[in-house]
Image: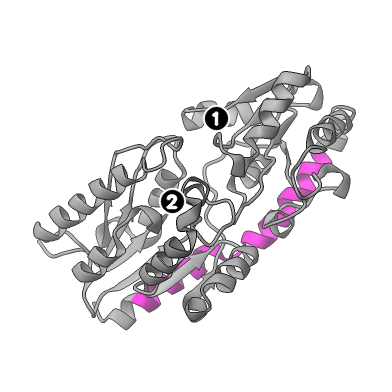
Amino acid sequence: MSAPHFTILAPWLSDTDWSGNLCSYFQRLLGGGNCNVVYSPCQYDPASSFGWLVPKMDISVRMLDSAMAGEFGGNVLVIDPNYVNIRALRYLVGNKGRIISLVHGGAFQKYDLETQYVEKWNPAKRRYEEGYFGLVDRIVLPSKHAKKIFSSQYRSLTRKITVIPYPVKNIPDGKASCQERNGIVVPCRNSYEKGSDVIASLLNSSKLNITRMQNLRQKEYFECVAGAMLTLIPSRADLYGMAAIESIYAGTIPVVPFAFSYPEYIKLPRNLFLSHPIGRATCKEIISVYNKISSFSTDEYREVISVAKSHLAKRLRGMDSKFLMELQNLRQQGAI
């Protein structure tokens, strides 16, 4: 049995995680017979300072096992490089193979998870990160905002960057009327980066009906989103805004800061955005926005969503062909 042309490398994979959707998308794009998937089923505790080492060590073992079995592709698509030993991967792929990597975060971000936990090591972490990204042949970032902050930290890697929005697929279209919608859902992980302090303050001081969506299967997740009045995402950093984009496609207005990648992809009336930076006044602002949205008629609500969906359709147009072209170009360059 010959090795596949491409290997998709995912540190973890589950029905509730975005990496599962990305893997399925790229498998379809590449054709099932031309690629295989190497993944770790390990999950990690984001509240643990070094919990990310568990999937990183596990995926390294699985990479080696796949290579020894002759099942490792000469070209590799990495779903999340922060949890993969890129140096070991470069050795396995060799000089002829090519590595393309999607980037979702890292030490180049101000509020990256690792940056928050081990702040005094940030300069060393960025040097390490720049080194392993230097071993990658192509770096895919999901927004112009992501490219700007990545390039500002790692200028030597700018030539390797391409900007392609990540796929958003298989989202049921919410049909609830404004009168049927109830409360606020929060899809963010419980971290300062995603405004956990703001959510905690709202829960303690307001009478708003707020639901934190944790560990839900995809069907349950989108049912919650589609039945809510709004999706609240008070982030202090975001390279793309997947949860906000998903919310729009599910038919629910997302409330996000007017900053980062959000203005690039999220088109809403200006008075429905939160001010930046997120801080003490954010809670009052959220209550005000919630009251505005609650006063919409069903037609007004649907018009906001319709405009937002049309904008997204334009921004995401051509995504499949761009990804396919990048993957084909890398394969030709690698001569594998």
Residue 294 lies in magenta, yes or no?
no
Name the residue located 29 percent from the left edge and 39 percent from the top edge.
Answer: 41
Q: Spot the residue most to the top.
A: 207
Q: Spot the residue most to the front.
A: 120
Secondary element at image label 2: helix
Q: What amino acid is labelled 2 in the image?
A: Leu
Q: Quadrant of residue 195?
A: top right
The one of 249 and 277 positioned closer to us in this rendering: 277
Residue 314 lies in magenta, yes or no?
yes
Q: Where is residue 293 in the image (x, y as percent from the top left)?
A: 84, 32
The quarter of the rendered structure image containing the N terminus is bottom left
The one of 236 and 19 positioned closer to us in this rendering: 236
Q: Mark 1 points at which residue?
A: 221
Name the residue located 52 percent from the left edge and 54 percent from the top edge.
Answer: 167
In the image, the segment drawn in magenta is 302-330
Q: Distance between the residues labelled 1 and 2?
A: 17 Å
The one of 72 and 27 positioned closer to us in this rendering: 72
- Numbered badge on residue 22: 2
Name the residue located 69 percent from the left edge and 40 percent from the top edge.
Answer: 234
Where 142 sits versus 230, above or below? below
Q: Position of residue 73 (x, y in %)?
A: 22, 65
Name the residue located 78 percent from the left edge and 17 percent from the top edge.
Answer: 207
* Res 137 visible: yes
Q: Which circle's residue, 1 or 2, is located before the other in the chain?
A: 2
Q: What amino acid is labelled 1 in the image?
A: Tyr
Q: Where is residue 90 in the image (x, y as percent from the top left)?
A: 26, 70
- Numbered badge on residue 190: none
